[in-house]
Image (spheres, grey):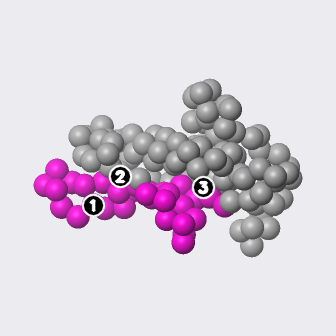
């Protein structure tokens, strides 16, 4: 389990029913973890390759500045890669993370007009 910049424990879980990874943090008193944010995705097959297209990430304002976005994205991308899916970072936060972390390059596909058209139809 990761810890944020305040020392609170943070856990990331995949919620397939909602097609998103969620991050929850426990307060210092060890109370019930609160959901702090999520990164949403859609899965697709493209030319025989399983892709996970990340299109939106958010962390609640009250949780800002704690590094939770980085923890969330790192764990979501690691899980995606571990399950043999290729990462497509449409979401600006995910795209910026991938740009700063070239060690994910072998597990990513670029965002193309075709991906964006597909995503729009998947979200309608």
Residue 56: give x, y in percent of width and height.
Answer: 60, 55
Which badge, 3 or 2, is on the more N-terminal residue?
Answer: 2
Residue 24: give x, y in percent of width and height.
Answer: 35, 57
Residue 16: give x, y in percent of width and height.
Answer: 54, 66
Element assignment for label 1: loop
Locate residue 115 relative to residue 102 in the image: left or right. Answer: right
Measure the alpha-carbon separation of dots 2 and 1. Answer: 9 Å
Of 46 and 90, nearer the camera is: 46
Q: Label 2 crowding class (10 Å Cα cut-off): few <14, some 14-19, many 20+?
A: many
Relative vertical location of residue 68 with respect to residue 116 in this rendering, above or below: above
Element assignment for label 3: strand
Q: Which residues are magenta?
A: 13-42
Count of marks, rendered view: 3
Residue 109 appears in the rendering: yes
- Residue at label 3? 56
Measure the alpha-carbon separation of dots 3 and 2. Answer: 19 Å
Residue at the extreme left of the image, as rendered: 29
Q: Label 1 crowding class (10 Å Cα cut-off): few <14, some 14-19, many 20+?
A: some
Q: Are marks 3 and 2 in contact (CB under 8 Å)?
A: no
Which badge, 2 or 1, is on the more N-terminal residue?
Answer: 2
Question: Which image quadrant: the C terminus?
Answer: bottom right
Of 115 and 80, nearer the camera is: 80
Measure the alpha-carbon separation of dots 1 and 3. Answer: 22 Å
Residue 73 appears in the rendering: no
- Residue at label 1? 33
Membership of 28 in magenta stretch? yes
- Residue at label 2? 11
């Amino acid at each position: 389990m990761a810890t944020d910049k305040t020392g609170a424990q943070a856990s990331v879980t995949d919620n397939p029913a909602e097609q998103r990874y969620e991050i929850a943090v426990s307060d210092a008193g060890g109370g019930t973890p609160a959901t702090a944010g999520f990164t949403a995705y859609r899965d697709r097959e493209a030319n025989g390759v399983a892709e996970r297209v990340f299109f939106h990430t958010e962390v609640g304002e009250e949780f800002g500045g704690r590094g939770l976005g980085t923890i969330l994205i790192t764990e979501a991308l690691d899980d995606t890669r571990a399950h043999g899916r290729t990462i497509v970072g449409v979401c600006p936060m995910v795209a910026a993370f991938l740009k700063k972390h070239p060690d994910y390059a072998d597990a990513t596909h670029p965002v193309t007009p075709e991906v964006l058209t597909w995503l729009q139809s998947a979200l309608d």
